[in-house]
Image (spheres, grey):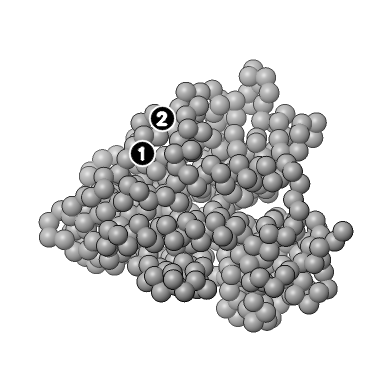
Amino acid sequence: MKVAAFDAIHPPDPALIDKCVHCGFCLPSCPTYVLWGEEMDSPRGRIYLMKAALDGRTEMTPAFVSHFDACLGCMGCVTSCPSGVQYAPLIEATRAQIERRYPRSFADRLFRGAIFALFPYPARLRIALMPLALFGRMIRKNRGDHGERREKYGLTLRSWRSPRFFPIAARLGAMLSLAPKVTWRSLFASTAARTPAVGPPRLTVGLLTGCVQRLVFPRVNAATVNVLSAEGCDVLAPPEQGCCGALALHAGRIDEARAFARRTIEVFERVGVQRIAVNAAGCGSSMKEYGQLLADDPAWADRARAFSARVRDVTEIVSELGPSRAPRHPLPLRVAYHDACHLAHAQGVRQPPRDLLRSIPGVEILPFAEQEICCGSAGIYNLVEPDAARELGERKAGHIDAVSPDLIATANPGCMLQMATASARLGRVRPICHPIEILDASIRGVDLVEM
């Protein structure tokens, strides 16, 4: 039996939908439209479907859902839209309707359920990542990190994508292909609860240590603390903090996102900070939306708005601090800076990361083609839509390879994993790091490329 597309519980706002004049400026900025050229896989087409659902002209069929599942939620359309359409609340409301009302297959529910039972919980994720600390080298050889096809381990990732295997095999293969390089040291690294400012304090900053970030890229947190401290910030990283709710929010699991948001607000309220620094673009985007996310909760609405007003990407804080206190040592590096979508498009933060890099003597930022197009990471997108994500990742890696940088910089852990995997498939293994790591290396006077 077909199911009515939307119910009365927070459907997409008709007023926001009506702002779309169907001009088409969003089409070349949409990754799925760039790949497939299909109208209903563009922002304009998806907004048309939302309107049709509100008007009762369509139902929640598999075809309807597939167009929204295919959306990366990258917000490239927001940047290009001359009418100021707010696509983020529209896609989030639509996905919430889908998650609540659409009967996904058992395999799909199982896979998605496993992701959300694991990734937002660092203690569980640590256990899941432990085999990578033991067998990571073998896994990377199997997936061909040096551009070689490896057959000697038997069941290759290519064969896992074969239709003869069970339906979620391609997704499991994608998950394996994205397996990060982790060590026992990285899995058990910790960030000090308090790091004092070097010299007179200028600002008290709370640090979100993240879920994946703290386990897979703890060096990013370490660099963030080092830079903020060197620039005169007291840095507080509450050890009891957990997930911010970004993955849940972007996937339409609104109740889970709200629960994580309340917990995050409560933790940082207790320590009392002037700013909350985030070094993961997807997390920062969601935390800046807490005011909207909890707007209907009388007990939390004001607290959420006050919290969101203090959230900044770490590069914004470095910019806000003004003239640098810590000296910069030269780093002769040609850097390809990739704009993480939830930093550039969702938060509108483009200049601070570039200003941060340009403050380092010797750094050259290299422009490359299609900088505005998503790399294919997009939260859990590269796990649930692996074919499109793979194509976007290799497209991005190819454009970056064309300018031959010394390293790649981006401000999101998902982008770092996605581009590392895509570059490896093309046989181009280059260092990939967060801009704050480059600044940290400059302040400390160390060679970043040798990390």
Residue at image position (67%, 42%) is 110
The residue carrying pointer 2 sits among few (fewer than 14), some (14 to 19) or many (20 or more) residues within 10 Å by Cα, namely some
Q: Residue furthest front?
A: 299
What residue would you read off at disc 2?
A: 183
For the C terminus, give its image quadrant. Answer: top left
Q: Residue furthest right?
A: 1
Q: Secondary structure under badge 2?
A: loop
Rendered location of residue 53, percent (x, y): 77, 71
The three-letter code of the residue at mark 1 reads Val
Residue at image position (64%, 46%) is 112
> Looking at this view, is 298 or 288 the one in front?
298
Q: Is residue 429 visible?
A: no
38 relative to 128 in the view: left or right: right
When asked about the image quadrant of residue 265, the answer is bottom left
Rendered location of residue 256, percent (x, y): 54, 56
What residue would you read off at disc 1?
A: 449
Rendered location of residue 62, percent (x, y): 80, 56
The residue carrying pointer 1 sits among few (fewer than 14), some (14 to 19) or many (20 or more) residues within 10 Å by Cα, namely some
Residue at image position (39%, 70%) is 303
When asked about the image quadrant of residue 55, the answer is bottom right
- Looking at the rendered image, the disc whose residue lies closer to the viewer, 2 or 1, is 2
Rendered location of residue 178, percent (x, y): 56, 38
Image: 153 above or below 101: above
